[in-house]
Image: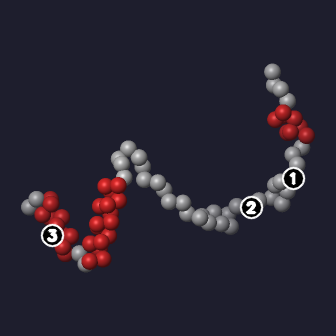
Amino acid sequence: MLTEQQLLQQFKALPPAKQLEVINFIHTLTQTTSSEPAPIPKRLGLLRGKLTVAEDFDAPLPDDIINAFYNDRS
């Protein structure tokens, strides 16, 4: 049996909701190019509760660090 015939036979055996999923998947495959990886969806809140910010995160830096940024190193 040809691959196309097998595919059609299996597709027809699926319930309508699953057939729609297959159609959507095929559409997705035809819309992406093989040279570009599919974008990874962003998951908001992934690190919620795992990071903390110090109370003084916006406090002025010490003078020696500020000078390191602005002094000429030549």
**Residue that badge 2 annotates:** 52
Sequence-first tag of 2 and 1:
2
Residue drawn at 80 percent across, 58 percent down: 54
Which residue is at a point 55% across and 63% down the rendered structure image? 43
User: What residue is drawn where x is 26% and y is 72%?
Assistant: 19
Upstream in the sequence, badge 3 or badge 2? 3
Q: Earlier in the sequence, mark 1 or mark 3?
A: 3
Q: Position of residue 52 (x, y in %)?
A: 74, 61
The reply to whether dot 2 and dot 1 touch (C-beta < 8 Å) is no
Mark 2: secondary structure: loop
Q: CA distance from mark 2 to mark 1?
A: 16 Å
Q: As drawn, is 5 to the left or to the right of 16? A: left
Mark 1 → mark 3, Cα distance in angstroms: 68 Å
Q: Quadrant of the N terminus?
A: bottom left
Return the residue at label 1. 59
Q: Name the disc covering residue 9, or none.
A: 3
The answer to whether 71 is drawn above or below residue 46 in the figure is above
Other-residue count near label 1 (Cα within 10 Å), few / some / many at <14 / 14–19 / ≥20: few
User: Vertically, is 25 above or below 32?
Assistant: below
Query: Mark 1: which amino acid?
Result: Ala
Instruction: Name the spot of residue 60 as percent of width and height, x first.
Output: 88, 49
Q: Amino acid at mark 2?
A: Thr
Q: Nearer the viewer, mark 2 or mark 1?
A: 1
